[in-house]
Image: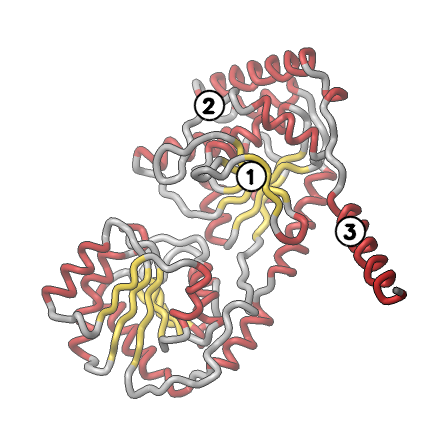
Amino acid sequence: MTHAYGNRSGVRYVTNGLKVYYVPWRPFLMQNTLPTLFLTLPIVRTIIIREKISVVHGHQAFSTLCHEALMHARTMGYKVVFTDHSLYGFADAGSIHMNKVLQFTLADIDQAICVSHTSKENTVLRSGISPEKVFMVPNAVDTAMFTPSPKRLSCDEIVIVVISRLVYRKGADLLVEVIPEVCRLFPKVRFIIGGDGPKRVRLEEMREKFSLQDRVEMLGAVPHAQVRSVLISGHIFLNSSLTEAFCIAILEAASCGLLTVSTRVGGVPEVLPDDMIVLAEPAPEDMVRAVKKAIDMLPGIDPQVMHLRMKKLYSWDDVAKRTEIVYDRAMQSSTTNLLDRLPRYLTCGSWAGKLFCIVMIINYLLWRLLEFLQPAEGIEEVPDIGPLHAQLDSRDNLCEAEEKRI
């Protein structure tokens, strides 16, 4: 379940029998939706009942729909799981606000998932959730989609690839200082930069200032389907993020056989073995040193061997199995009523705790009102899509047999 994207709203079916509900809530800025607290309760309740949901799994701390859906699901007595994909600070106003919201959501949660040990530590500190409730389940990569080039690239010209959003958090300002120095030290190095964002102007100004138009190629936004074709044209993948919980882009690059140079931030040091990545502090001088070390390592890098190692290290099947364990643990947790849950919110602060209790009481009363106006028994449950597929397959087989008989 997610919010509407452009004209896309309603129910859509995707591959492997997945169904997506695009709730008709329009985003207002950068695909963010305004918080409504209680307005999403009727539609969330209807979807949960219609689809016979057992566990509601929310993703991302900045998603207002995620927080509201988890709140409504908990009010209705369902098991809830939350996954945090990012790292946040503690000092700025935005982080303080989001940390308090996260504390509210995770005060009454069955289980939580983080994508790295660093992310787990960050989430526990920000929300106050018990570490025993938090599982570390890393991201993965579809190695069948991200394969190396069949032909090994020549090292006569070294190509460094950058694919990321060109924003401050992704270290775009760091690239502005690193690229000219690398080009000065290594005449045979060329850069390919894929991505768009507010910092793109600074990179283009840098290219003009140092006359690097023939050595720095700006691709703009790259569709995910074309990321591999960009990656396999390079030798080194450069990640300059200032904060990162995991970084799937590094996995995709390594699966394509690229040696990675990255800033030593967040959960990045946990992603790859030392012989597949060169880490550096988020400073221009150290980044240049790391690029030089990576260039020296290139003759000993075999893209095909690196790809095979990635197939063993990361698999979405393994992620699914580990996530299923989290769901099983959530289903085994005890079910509590509202009076038992309210004290958990009181631990969120002297005034915030009382406010959170009031919100949950109002949400509970609204849910009981909906139960009276539209009982759950009156909401039609949708049929399972699996048996329908089986019926269609059986019908197709019968048709083929009949055609052969005729």
Q: Which residue is mark 3?
A: 392
**Outermost residue toward the front?**
406
Position of the N terminus by quadrant? top right
Secondary element at tag 1? strand
**Labels 1 & 3 near each other (Cβ < 8 A):** no
Q: Which residue is mark 2?
A: 36
**Outermost residue toward the left?**
209
What percent of the width, then of the height, locates residue 274?
A: 44, 73
Distance of label 2 from label 1 (alpha carbons): 17 Å
Identified at 31% across, 51% down, the residue is 169
Q: Which residue is mark 1?
A: 58
What percent of the width, then of the height, locates residue 69?
A: 56, 31
Front-lying residue, 96 or 21: 21
Identified at 17% across, 70% down, the residue is 213
Given the image, on which type of amino acid does mark 2 rest? Answer: Thr
- Specify whether 129 is left or right of 52: left
Please identify, in this view, whether the residue under mark 1 or under mark 3 is nearer the observer.
3
Distance of label 3 from label 2 (alpha carbons): 41 Å
Please identify, in this view, whether the residue under mark 2 or under mark 1 is nearer the observer.
2
Q: Alpha-carbon neighbours of circle 3 within 10 Å: few (<14), some, or many (≥20)?
A: few
Front-lying residue, 66 or 26: 26
- Specify whether 382 is left or right of 262: right
Q: Alpha-carbon neighbours of circle 1 within 10 Å: few (<14), some, or many (≥20)?
A: many
Given the image, on which type of amino acid does mark 3 rest? Answer: Leu
Given the image, on which type of amino acid does mark 1 rest? Answer: Gly
Secondary element at tag 3? helix
Pick whichever of labels 3 and 2 is earlier in the sequence: 2
Q: Alpha-carbon neighbours of circle 2 within 10 Å: few (<14), some, or many (≥20)?
A: few
Position of the C terminus by quadrant? bottom right
